[in-house]
C-alpha cells in the first residue's frame, strides 16, 4: 500500500513539474534579468561624474522601460505574444526569448540564489540547506526553485549548487578564522 501511495505521489509530482517547470524557470529568469533587476534610478545619473557610467545608467533605465512594455504583451505572464507588438518590441522580445532559452539553467539558479541571499541578508557563513529553507520560508514554498523538467536534473542541479556553496562557505570560514579582526564586509 505504501509503495502504491509513493508511486502515485511520484506521478503527481512528475505531472506538476511538467506543467510548471517552464513557467517557474521564466519567473526565475525575470527575477535575475527582468525589470526589477534594474536597481538604478534617474537620480543615479546625476550622482555620477563618470560620463561612461551615466550612459550605462541611461541604457539600464531604457532596458527596464522597454522590457516592461514588452512583458505587458505576454500571455499568462510567460508566453510571448508578438501579435500586438511594434517592430522594435518584437525584436526585443525575440532576443529576450533567445537569451532565456540559451542561458545555462544552473548559472541562472546560482544567480537567483545569490539574489535571494542578498535580498534576505543571509550571511555567508549560513549553510546552504539553511539558506534554501530561509528562502523557501520567505517565498512561502519551494516552487521558486523547481525549474527543471526532469526530477533527476533538478536533483543534480541542487546537488551541484550545494557542493559549490558549501565549498565557498568553508573557504569563507577558514578566511574569517585566519583574519578575525576583519568585519563582515572585509573592511577593518
Image (cartoon, rainbow, N blue to C red):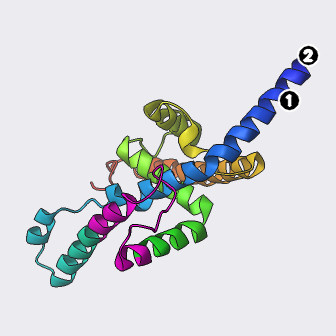
Counting every numbered tag in the picture gives 2
Percent coordinates x, y for residue 164 in the rendering: 61, 55
Mark 1 or mark 2: whose residue is earlier in sequence: 2
142 left or right of 151? left
Q: Which residue is mark 1?
A: 7
Q: Which of the two residues, 140 or 65, is positioned nearer the viewer here? A: 65
Q: Which of the pair 19/158 is nearer the observer?
A: 19
Please give the range of residues in magenta: 63-91
From the viewer's perspective, is 124 left or right of 57? right
Any part of residue 173 in sight? yes
Spatial CA distance of label 1 from label 2 is 10 Å
Q: Quadrant of residue 130?
A: top right
Image point 60% across, 66% down: which residue? 104
Magenta residue check for 140: no
- Where is 110 relative to 61, above or below? above
**Callouts 1 and 2 close, C-beta under 8 Å:** no
Residue at x 83% of width, y 26% of height? 6
**Furthest residue to the bottom?**
52
Q: Residue furthest top?
A: 1
Q: Secondary structure at mark 1?
A: helix
Quadrant including the C terminus: bottom left
Does the rendering let one see residue 175? Answer: no
Residue 96 x/y as whole percent? 47, 70
What residue sits right under mark 2 in the picture? Answer: 1
Quarter of the image with the N terminus is top right
Amino acid at each position: 500500500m505504501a509503495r502504491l501511495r509513493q508511486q502515485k505521489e511520484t506521478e503527481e509530482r512528475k505531472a506538476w513539474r511538467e506543467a510548471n517547470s517552464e513557467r517557474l524557470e521564466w519567473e526565475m529568469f525575470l527575477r535575475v534579468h527582468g525589470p526589477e533587476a534594474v536597481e538604478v534610478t534617474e537620480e543615479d545619473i546625476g550622482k555620477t561624474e563618470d560620463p561612461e557610467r551615466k550612459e550605462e545608467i541611461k541604457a539600464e533605465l531604457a532596458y527596464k522601460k522597454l522590457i516592461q512594455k514588452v512583458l505587458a504583451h505576454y500571455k499568462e505572464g510567460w508566453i510571448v505574444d508578438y501579435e500586438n507588438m511594434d517592430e522594435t518590441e518584437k525584436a526585443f522580445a525575440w532576443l529576450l526569448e533567445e537569451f532565456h532559452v540559451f542561458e545555462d539553467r544552473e548559472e541562472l539558479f546560482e544567480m537567483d540564489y545569490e539574489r535571494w541571499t542578498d535580498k534576505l541578508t543571509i550571511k555567508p557563513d549560513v549553510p546552504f540547506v539553511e539558506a534554501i529553507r530561509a528562502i523557501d520560508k520567505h517565498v512561502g514554498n519551494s516552487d521558486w526553485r523547481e525549474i527543471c523538467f526532469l526530477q533527476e536534473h533538478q536533483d543534480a542541479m541542487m546537488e551541484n549548487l550545494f557542493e559549490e556553496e558549501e565549498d565557498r562557505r568553508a573557504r569563507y570560514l577558514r578566511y574569517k578564522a585566519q583574519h578575525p579582526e576583519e568585519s563582515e564586509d572585509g573592511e577593518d
